[in-house]
Amino acid sequence: MRVLFTVFASRTHMYNMVQLAWALRSSGHEVCVAGQPDLVDMIATTGLSAVPVGKALTPGSDGWRGRGMQNLDVLSRGLAAPHEEQRDGGWEYVLGEWTMACGVRYESLGDQHMVDDLVKFARTWEPDLVVWDAMTFAGPVAAIACGAAHARMNFGRDYIYRLYQDYVALRDKQPPEQRDDPLEDWFTGRLARIGHEYDPSMAKEMLTGQWTIDPLPEWLRVPTDLPSVHASYVPYNGRITISDWVYRKPEVPRVCLSFGVSLREHVGGAIVSIEDMLGAVADLDIEVIATLDASQVDPAAVPDNVTLVGFVSLNELMPSCSVAVHQGGYGTYSNALVHGVPSLIIPHPFWDEAECGVLFEERGAGLCLTPEEFTPEAFREKLVRLLEEPHFRRTALELRQEIHDAPKPLDVVPRLEQLTAQHRGRDTQG
Amino acid sequence: MTRYQIDPRLCSDSDLARHLLTARGVQWMHGERGVPLALLLRGLESDRHALYEEIRRRPGLSSSHVGVWVTAGHPAAAAALSDPRLGARAPGPKPRRNQVFTNDADTTLKHVMTVDDGTLELEHDAYERLARHTGPVLGAAAVEARTRSFGDLFERRADGLTGRFDLMDDYARPGVTAALADVIGLPAGARERVEALIADTGPVLDSLLCPPTLRTSRRLVGAYDGVKTALAGVLGAGPATSGAPAGSLLAEVPRLAADDPQAEADVLTAGLLTLVVGTHLASNLVCGTVHALLRHPGQLALVRDDGSLAGAAVEETLRYAPPVRLVSRVAREDLQLAGTEIAAGDQVVVLVEAANCDPAANADPRVFSVERTDGAHVTLDGLPGRFVAPVVRALATEAVRVLMSRVPKLEPEGEPVRHMRSPVTGAIARYPLNAAV
């Protein structure tokens, strides 16, 4: 088969696809990955073939289209709110989310330049299957244009489909004159450009693919009625060089502390700071490896038991850790789960962090401390529990085993071949 | 015309959809950031008056976002609407009419699309000429003289109302359209088609500021063009062939303005404005007045007792629940208004409904009273509403008077259902009522 992966210019979204792309490649299929020009070097470092499409997305990068990008607000604002709160927002809330998604957010991530280039490439290269990142909606358009099957690659919990279901349910309760449907215009316009007519029955497939490839273990997933293939998470953390100390067995329990750069900006309230967090555990007999640099924390405020390391691959670091403290991001919690390390989650507000925090706690694989509840004392208390109560580690190891027993990207290749044959809209090239 | 204001006829579905979606998405996003005008433009029935008060706290004109000014005060609104320096076209090079507003756009979007700028977006002097030419048919005195025939027409409609009916679909719009077709002198052969098309031109005023959906945009433009073609066809045939009755626009105006080479074009423009804008303003005003009366039984009783108060009820509805809530103007030159420097090309959005409820202009402005003696409002001061004001007032008054006198008991069967994305007019799609015996 020829398999075209496509993803907007986000390193972490690309990381999420690398193992599956290589699984297909090593099974003898032809694979290439299309993304905006500012992702191309990164794609190439994975050893996969990169196809530049559209214009650069990263502000300031070469060829960035710039200017009106101030319209691109926080990508997933609202999607990350607790689900019950979202539902309280009702029709105005869900309509607003899709209005902004179709007009600004998702349209910016994969604009017309990208769609046009991707369609052009797909019509030339004629892939049998298009695997698209769950936010890269140029993917289904290109697949339809060239008659390929198409599958959506999920990251984190499936908030997109959940919000769509909420939207449909609330829309259908509106009087006919008020059933506003931004998705219809979005897809109609995109399909018109490739000479296809949109029918409202296509909406679900345009949003979620002919099937979904989901890397999350079942207990973390949003229950779904969508056709799905589970290919469990296998870490890929970029091109890395490992220092000796990473593999050295620590003399005291090692705690990994890893956050995105935006911690300070987004964690609510002035009381929360990295300095508070580090200060709270300064007297514990542990070794804290913090993936922070001097721009994120004042080195003078760093206690003796804390080492700042800038970047370190979590896949290599986790095996030596007793606890991982993090923001609940998909890549981070997945690395912790794969290595059986309990998590202390201080959730960021971007995507599924808050719900994952709750689910980790319910499942016994960690504890959650919301920014609102954060105090240095509460932080210290939860960390000590995770270090001292063995059931957390036991559960984390059970979950690790579940992941190891589940199908890996390589195991699902035959299923993907089968589904592709079933869904492909044109004859195979032989 | 403003930059990024597009003519849907010049755009592919793909470009038009992108334009409309981005315009709507960016509007929504500005709303998320708390911009009151952007929240109003969502067109959801949220608490508009709280937003008006927020804007009114800043005197004169206040900046909404870059190059966009807004006013909720009555004095500033009245000044803006009567100032010919505030028009429909930004100075400078003519816009391309197909320049899609995207996330890369380098200015704010002001006007979303144009349906027919040669008719709907004329400047003050053009409307004044139009009013002069058509005054003998569409002016206040001429319209007044038709009161009786309007009344007869609505009586025939009202007498057919029994049990559950829809005030908009079964009474207001068909009655208004038929009356306007008489005023225009539309021949019988063209009426049915034109009346059907007019219903689809509903978003004609809203689409300037709030993007309709792709499908609605296409339908709007198609229907509008259909009306225009039909009218132009009748006009081209000449009054004798078309059989336009004496006293109607098609019959009279060419004769009255025979020396003016502009006359035929003006008749077409006036006919379109009357049929399209007139129908929607008048029919929404009828529904709005009835709705206000049904919600205020004391006021309803006054009008039922004294039919001559119907005009006062309509006038109070124009103030209290206007069929035009926003009017957008563009500065044709640098100017000063209400103490604010406005640059050429800037947009001024007059919050008509807010200005009508300015406590500086009216006592207890949120109270609906047909006996009000102040009642200052700017609803029909703006363009193109001003042009159709006489006929809109006369039709709504007769429609309300007749309904009140012919249908002794009216009960609402629910709230009026408004069209989505209609922040400018709050257009009523349906208003189910019960004509109890």
Image (spheres, rainbow, N blue to C red):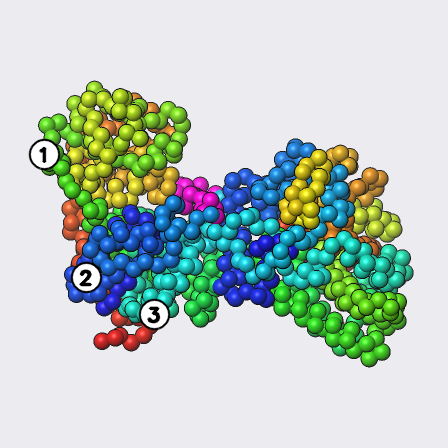
Q: Residue furthest bottom?
A: B241
Q: Would you say the residues marked 3 and 1 are in contact, meaning their CB atoms lie under 8 Å apart? A: no
Q: Are marks 1 and 2 in contact (CB under 8 Å)?
A: no
| Label at residue B313 | none
Q: Which mark is residue A248?
A: 1
Q: Is residue A72 within the magenta segment? A: yes
Q: Is residue B11 left or right of residue A35?
A: right
Q: Residue at x 38, y 45 (%)?
A: A60
**Closer to the camera in the image, B244 or A38:** A38
User: CA gap, disc 2 to disc 3?
Assistant: 21 Å
**On what subunit does the disc labeled 2 rest?**
A
Residue furthest top as drawn: A283
Q: Residue at x 60, y 50 (%)?
A: B110
Q: Up-down: is A93 above or below A152? A: above
Residue B53 location in percent, x, y? 65, 36
Q: Which mark sits nearer the N-terminus, 2 or 3?
A: 2
Amino acid type, mark 2 = Arg
Which quadrant of the figure has residue B374?
top right
Residue B272, position as x, y percentages in the image: 74, 64
The residue carrying pointer 3 sits among few (fewer than 14), some (14 to 19) or many (20 or more) residues within 10 Å by Cα, namely some
Q: How would you rate the neighbour count of disc 1 (Cα within 10 Å): few for under 14, some for 14-19, many for 20 or more?
A: few
- Image-quadrant location for residue A110: bottom left
Q: Mark 3 highlights which residue?
A: A123
- Residue A376 position, x and y percent, is 30, 23
Disc ID at residue A25:
2
What stretch of residues is rendered in magenta? A68-88
Query: How far, Cα to Cα, is label 1 from label 2?
Result: 34 Å
The three-letter code of the residue at mark 1 reads Arg
- Residue B303 located within the stretch drawn in magenta: no
